Amino acid sequence: MNGSGKNIYPWAFGMSFLILTGLIALLIFNTYQLEDKNYQVEQVNRIQNAYGAAVMDDKIFPGGNAVFQSELVPCLSVWYQKKLQGSADVNAYGYQCMGRFLEQLRKQQSLDSIFRQIVQQQKLDTTLVYLFHFDKLEIYEVKDSTWKVFYESASENRAGAISGKLAKASNNNRVFQLSVSDKNPIAYRFTYSLFVDYENRDWRIFQRMAPVFLLSLACISVIVLLSYRTYKNWVNQRKLADLKTSFLHHIRHEFNTPLTTILVTAHSLIDQAAARDDREVAQLGRIVERQAKRLKEYFGQVMGTVALQEQQAKLVQVPIDESTQEILDELRLRYGGEIDIVYDPIGDGTALFLDESYYFSILDNMVSNAIKFNDHTQKEIRFAWEKVDSRHFLKITDNGIGIAFTDREAIFTAFYRGHLSGNRPGLGLGLYYVKSCLDRLGWKIHLENPPGGGTIFYIYIDNESFNGKKQA
């Protein structure tokens, strides 16, 4: 097994898992933020409308305007003058004024009763709590036409609280932020906010998001489990592949050596028997030689079929007429006149991409099958490359026994022998090996039984299916 590949796989899985987990966490966080921002939107709208109706033209709460006039307005002019003159006690004076003003607001406020009335009228959850909070006081500067902040209190600063018990105020539970203003004795603007929420808001949101959390956790768990199982399967497959390769090399050597020895010995027996004119020994030698060749052929088919699964097609561009003619010439010598092999060249110098070893195996097995499954005295197989609509296909015609219609789909599977094969020797691997080679090349095969007998095969060099009869 390749050690570097084995080490890269866990790292790739780990990085992918971390990235995926980070993305899921980011999506959950964004979902939480969106849920937090939009939580209780309907109640917020109803509170806004009800509060506006309760206050009407007064400031903050009914009677609030009187507090403004008695506590804030009298000190604004002096405070403003101190600010312009840069007096040393301007800040102390401002804090004193605002502290006294806010204290009177707290004492005279009727916001508790207003809020309870809103909750009752609007049929809201009675566990809601609120906070009225002073935000800032601004003075209008006439000379540059801008509002200047004189006093400010952050929402988390409890010193700015006017009324209410809500402990945690934020933009997400702010119902509104309003400003009240006046021009006398100087133009000022007083801004305050109303916050309404549950004290256990985070827990409530978490409960609403529980299905999202649980589903995300389940998805991550499934991904981890599947990835682990995939990794284990990958490791096991690599081990099996290495074991199979080692086994093939070993078994090929262990079988070829004795088979070669048997063939050499049989041939020697035949030669010695011929020298002594011993016909019985010569006949036995020929039987041994014939059966050894047969066994070697079967062994070659089986080993070739198994080894094919480990190979990758090596495509090269070759002149198809020249390549086909060379292979068929070699096959004519091998089969020694057992069959008449004819080739009709395409004749236009066509060059096609193919794997030469696969192509040789395809033609070899087609010729071998045409010999084996043929009852004629004069056996024949004809090859012809043709072209239709810019697509090339190889037409192979023999005068053998043909293939039963019911066998057409199964004939290309391993160890399948057709209904017409009878007691003929063979393992049923010839056409399976042809189909395996074609699959590696991305080619397709189609067969027909012509009316006069025999079989016609069409091999197409693209991935589309054609009607062979129509194209022929």
Image (cartoon, rainbow, N blue to C red):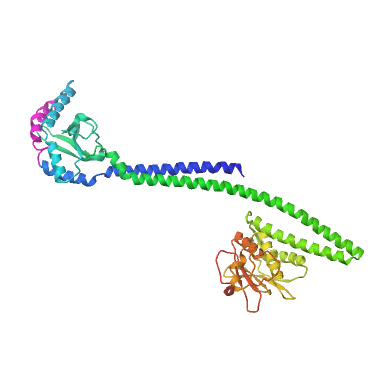
Residue 239 lies within the magenta run: no
Horizontal relation, residue 438 to residue 91: left or right = right
The dominant secondary structure in magenta is helix
What percent of the width, then of the height, locates residue 248? 68, 52
Count of labels in the image: 0
Q: Nearer the viewer, residue 283 or 99?
A: 283
Residue 79 among magenta residues: yes
- The location of residue 127, given as percent across then percent down, is 21, 40
Look at 88% across and 67% down and name the residue there: 279
Q: Is residue 51 visible?
A: no
- Residue at the outermost right position: 276
Q: Nearer the viewer, residue 147 or 307?
A: 307
Question: What residue range appears in magenta?
Answer: 57-80
The quadrant the N terminus occupies is: top right
Residue 126 in view of the camera: yes
Q: Is residue 363 left or right of residue 218?
A: right
Residue 59 % position (x, y): 11, 37
Q: Nearer the viewer, residue 188 or 169?
A: 169
